[in-house]
Every structure is written in C-alpha cells, then in structure tokens.
C-alpha cells in the first residue's frame, strides 16, 4: 500500500478536479410514449489533487465509465446532467471541455482498439507532443521508460501484444501535457505480470505531480496504487476512504458496503454479501444500500443520507 503522507497537506492546495453533487440521467419512454428519466449517477462528489491517484471502484454497469465521459464531455446528446465539475478551479463548461480534451485532460481508454489500426504506434504517440523538434526523442524516451522494445514505434497496433498496446496508450498520456489523466478500466484480462507492470506505469504518471483517476472494479489492484478510493454503489458515492483504511478487519472503514467488500477477500473473512446491486434506474426513497445492509433501520428506508466527513474520510451512512 502507498504512503499517503504527500496527501496530508492537500487541504492547502487547489484540486485539479472537483466534482460536486453531480447526477447523470438518460430518457426512457414508458406507456403511451411518456418520457421519464433514468438516473444512473446520483449526487456524485470527488476531488483529486496534484500528484494524487484516486480510484473509483464499482461493479460492472455501475456507471463508472459514464463519469469519465461526463468529465471529458463526450456523453450522448440525450444525456441530462446536474451539478458542477471544476478543473483547476474553473467550471468545466462544454467549451472548456472541447479545449482541454486530449490536452490538459487525457484518457487511457479501456480498449486497445482505441489505437488507430492504420498508423504506426510511434506516429500515434508523437501526435500529442507539442515540441515539433523533439517529437521522436520524447516518444522514444517514453517507450524506453515503459520497457517497450526499441522497434515498437515502427509497428502497427495489430503487431503488438495486448500488454504492449496498453503501454502505448499509457505512453500517449506520459508525453502529453495533461494535468488530469483518466484511466478507464485499463487492467481487465491481464495476467499477473502484465497487471503489475500496468499498475506501475499508471503510478508513474502521478509522480510528476499529475492527477490520476483510475476507474476499476478490482479493489485489490486499486489498493496497490491508490491514495484514496471512492466506492461506487447504485450510482452513488457511498464512501471515499484513504488507502490505509483498508487494513485489519476493516475497523477504519466507515460504510457497511465498503466493510463488506473488504471482508469478502480470501485473506479476510471471505464472507460474501447477500443480495445484488440495484438495477440501473431503480429509485430509492432512502439509502440505496438499505435492502442489503446488516445494520439498516426503518429510518434508513425512508431517509437518504447525506455525505459527512468522519475520520478524514467521506461517507453516506446514518450509523457510520
């Protein structure tokens, strides 16, 4: 687990990214073509400071990747949003998103198919380098840093292994001037060695004071590089915990869902949580976790908890 000492002073710094009370919904048509909206992200909040890696953890289909699309400004036209997103203290409007996308804000996409199949990898990485006289040198240094073979720049994406292709995508983020890098599920399907290498390379991105949002469903991988972890459940942030809180039997964790996740690991109690995540668009008057919560009361069923700061973390639970 990482040393979070550098984050202890973040209160005195301006966050690179600040998401406040953000909600995202899509239209659906019911009987007689009556339009209503399905809310897939609800009252989401998050801050990421320079040099910090914040991991957004949630099950598949929980809306994590849509959050990345919202920050980048690439949501479908029928998406409806509420709340505010700030980048470097400035409200992230559609115009600002167009200016910053691919420059100050960079995406490491989930699929290696994002690489252009008709362009050699070296040229693809060089496209984002501003210094025209040093494009080749900077690209080669990035490939060397990521331990890619010297001839990788002369190959097309189909000539690379999956792990090599992912490193090319990471190289694109390294050579960019991005202050915020969003890594969207970059590790699925990797063997143990490739996983460790990918995590190491993502960690390197934060070491020159860049901010990293790492989106994943693999909390064990997250703990290897995260400073803080935002736990996503039913489209809501139920807890934002520090890396060091995931220890022992989870005594320092605040939310019952986060504690259940931690206890489900083989090295802990290996105790599964009964029930399943709510369906997309399922609405709750009270707490979204109440149907599965071992400590829920009638009050939880009828009232929605707001975020509160407890022991240097953020949680939505009446009994945290």
Image (tube, grey):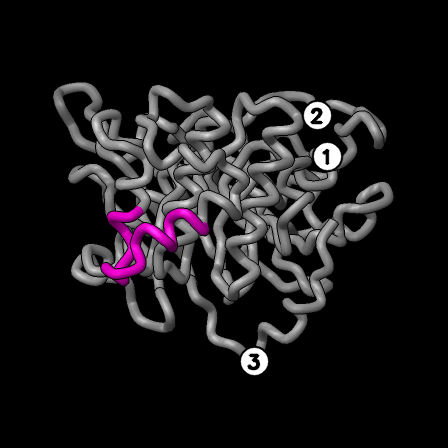
Q: Quadrant of residue 189?
A: top right
Q: Residue furthest bottom?
A: 12
Disc number at residue 153?
none
Q: Secondary structure at mark 1?
A: helix
Vertical side of 171 occupied by 228: above or below: below
The answer to whether mark 1 and mark 2 are in CB contact below 8 A is: yes
Q: Is residue 158 above or below residue 127?
A: above
SS assignment at label 3: helix
Q: Is residue 154 visible?
A: yes
- Few, some or many C-alpha atoms within 10 Å of disc 1 (few <14, some 14-19, many ≥20)? many
**Of residues 291 and 20, the one drawn nearer to the viewer in this rendering:** 20
In the displayed structure, 288 sits above or below 165; it is below
**Residue marked by disc 3:** 12
* Image disc number at residue 273: 2
Part of the protein shown in magenta:
126-141
Residue 175, position as x, y percentages in the image: 38, 54
Q: Find residue 260 and name its label.
A: 1
| In contact (CB < 8 Å): disc 3 and disc 1 | no
**Any magenta on residue 131?**
yes
Query: Closer to the N terminus: mark 1 or mark 2?
Result: 1
Q: Is the stretch drawn in magenta largely helix, strand or loop?
A: helix
Q: CA distance from mark 1 to mark 2?
A: 6 Å
């Amino acid at each position: 687990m990482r040393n979070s000492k550098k984050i202890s002073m973040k209160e005195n710094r301006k966050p690179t990214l600040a998401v406040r009370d953000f909600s995202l919904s899509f239209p659906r048509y019911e009987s007689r073509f009556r339009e209503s909206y399905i809310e897939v992200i609800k009252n989401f909040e998050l801050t990421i400071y320079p040099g910090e890696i914040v991991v957004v953890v949630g099950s598949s289909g929980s809306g994590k990747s849509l959050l990345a699309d919202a920050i980048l400004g690439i949501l479908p036209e029928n998406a409806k949003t509420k709340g505010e997103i700030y980048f470097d203290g400035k409200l992230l409007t559609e115009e600002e998103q167009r200016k910053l996308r691919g420059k100050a804000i960079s995406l490491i996409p989930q699929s290696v198919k994002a690489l252009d199949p008709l362009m050699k990898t070296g040229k693809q990485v060089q496209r984002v380098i501003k210094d025209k006289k040093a494009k080749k040198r900077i690209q080669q240094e990035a490939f060397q840093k990521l331990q890619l073979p010297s001839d990788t720049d002369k190959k097309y994406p189909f000539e690379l292994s999956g792990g090599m292709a992912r490193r090319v995508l990471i190289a694109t983020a390294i050579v960019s001037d991005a202050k915020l890098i969003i890594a969207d599920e970059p590790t699925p399907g990797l063997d143990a060695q490739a996983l460790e290498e990918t995590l190491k390379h993502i960690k390197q991105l934060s070491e020159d004071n860049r901010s990293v949002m790492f989106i994943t469903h693999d909390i064990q991988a997250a703990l290897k590089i995260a400073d803080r972890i935002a736990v996503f459940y039913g489209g809501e942030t139920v807890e934002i915990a520090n890396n060091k809180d995931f220890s022992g039997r989870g005594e320092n964790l605040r939310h019952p869902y986060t504690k259940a996740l931690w206890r489900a690991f083989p090295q802990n109690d290996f105790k599964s949580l009964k029930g399943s995540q709510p369906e997309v668009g399922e609405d709750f008057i009270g707490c979204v976790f109440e149907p599965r919560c071992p400590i829920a009361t009638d009050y939880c069923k009828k009232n929605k908890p707001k975020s509160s700061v407890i022991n240097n973390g953020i949680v939505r639970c009446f009994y945290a």
